[in-house]
Image (cartoon, rainbow, N blue to C red):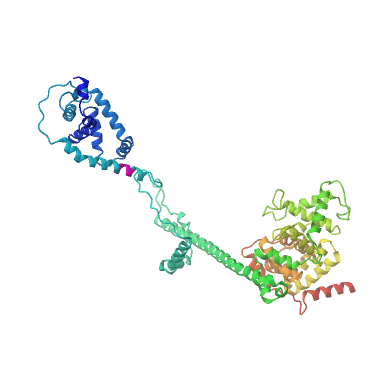
Amino acid sequence: MDRSKDASCSPATVNNGAEDLAACSSLCPGSDHGPIGRFCEDQGAGLSPREDDEDEEEEARTDVIGSDVAAQRWSEEEEGDDDAFTGGGARHRNTFACRRRRQSAPGDLQPDEPEPEPEPEPDPESELQSRRPDIAEYFSCRKQRCVSQSVPGWKLFGKVPPKQSPSKQPRIIQQEFEARQVAARCSPTHNAVGQQSRRKAEPLSTTALILQDRPPDLPAKSAEETQRHRQQYEQMVAAAKRRELAAAERRQQQMTQRFRQEVEISNATLVWNQHILPHWDAMRDSRRARDLWWGGLPPSVRGRVWSLAIANELNITAELYEIFLSRAKEKWTNLSDTDACFPSDGASLADSLEVIARDISGVLPSLGVFQKGGPYHDLLQSILGAYICYRPDVGYVQGMSSVAAMLILNMDEVDVFISFSNLINRRCQLAFYRGQHQLMLRYFGAFQVFLQESLPRLFLHFQSSGVTPDLYLLDWILSLYLKPLPLEVACRVWDLFFRDGEEFLFRTALGILKLHQDVLLHMDLISTAQFLSRPPDEELLSDRLFSCISATPMLSGNRTWSQVFSSWSDSETNS
């Protein structure tokens, strides 16, 4: 037929061709005959929901394409099938083409043949109009679903998006948390857990002891042997349980003690900061301060209390420290020269630095902060070098590095130099560091008086073995007990040394001897010297040691330490 005749159809009829094809496909579902049939089937299949994830993705892609793809398909089919639109109205020709393609295979299209007159059918226009709202509603619903799926928080694989809970005020969250805590503490479950935690710990590893029978390829055990092995197995399990229970009880005791110490330290810190330190001069010798001092100073206030207890009788300032530090750095740049600011015995600066370097390398090795490359190595060397320039008459003596290191752990740099200089300037320390032999003998003689008074058996044993006080007291006094005791125990000794003075140093020595008296009574001279150079680190050493110190008062008859020391010095002078 001529193209002009086909073009004479009304524009409305031609424009509604795609809609007629959709109506045809809805009337004949399941068709797969030709491109138009496939398009109609695809559009019709979208009206029913799918449960497969792959179909859902195909639907989403179809929705994105929209009506433009449908129009493009319709235009291609219209150009390839001009004969389908010959004769009759556009509506009947479209219906006829759909019917003919449903009867032919997609790959084997038959030529146009005369078809019998179709049976009268309901008006497709009215049916198409009735279906149009459903199609429009479907596409609008699909667009809304795509938009809702693209919102933030959408999860793939069919998961439900997370619920957006309204934000709460921090104060409300805190109140809810406190309310839950109160409810948990009041619940019976909480009480049951607390009671269960207080029970004895059960053994953990005894299940590794398994009693097995003899392999089948070996002769079976006799009844007596089986019974004996059963008893041995039960004894092994019982012994393992006892060991584990004892270890668990020790761990529980350590945890309980640590918790108790933390509580005591927290309470003591509050008292020191609020009541004692603000009124130091008035509260230093009070009963409350001395009791807290005996239990050990809290680490947070230890440096400040030490600085106040040592005081600054030499009136050293920060400017003076900078002057001597700069002098020490100038001398270090030229190790081959000697200078008057170093020991007066003629030792060169290189020798002094060698002694300092050798001594620093062994200061508190467990910490590893004072060795070469450590964070406090240069600071410790600066303090010692500045002191050598400040006190050339004293110079450097082995043991000073440990004292300076302890101060560095608790004070600032300038405070360390001030406290270190004033501490070395005390009578006892100056006598030992400068090697004043006569004064050292007076200290040893006074100590012997209290040793005979407190530990008479050990005193006699030392006399028979030839053990003299200088054999062990010299290292203890020079290092202020950092060498024989662990760091935490030595800190407590330092606390009370700054409270009671030099008397407590010798009282600590009596406490150590009292603690190990039973062992020392069976040792000779060499064994005693080796043992006292580094006593063993035992469990709960601090409590046991200070219990022995507390049980050893510094009284000889009715005389105190100062009275005994004065009388000993007078007797030495008269002799």
Q: Is residue 487 left or right of residue 203?
A: right
Q: Residue at point 16% right, 21% down?
A: 112
The answer to whether residue 189 is above or below residue 73 is below
**Residue 167 at x, y percent in the picture:** 44, 57
Which of the 4 image quadrants contains residue 544?
Answer: bottom right
The answer to whether residue 491 is above or below residue 50 is below
**Residue 258 at x, y percent in the picture:** 58, 64
Can the viewer see residue 486 in this picture? no
Which of the 4 image quadrants contains residue 280?
Answer: bottom right
Residue 342 among those drawn in magenta: no
Q: Is residue 496 left or right of residue 392?
A: left
**Residue 151 at x, y percent in the picture:** 39, 46
State the quadrant of the N terminus.
Answer: top left
Q: Nearer the viewer, residue 264 or 113?
A: 113
**Residue 419 at x, y percent in the picture:** 76, 63
Which of the 4 image quadrants contains residue 436?
Answer: bottom right
The segment highlighted magenta reads 141-145
The answer to whether residue 327 is above or below residue 306 is above
Q: Nearer the viewer, residue 323 or 421?
A: 323
Can the viewer see residue 393 in this picture? yes
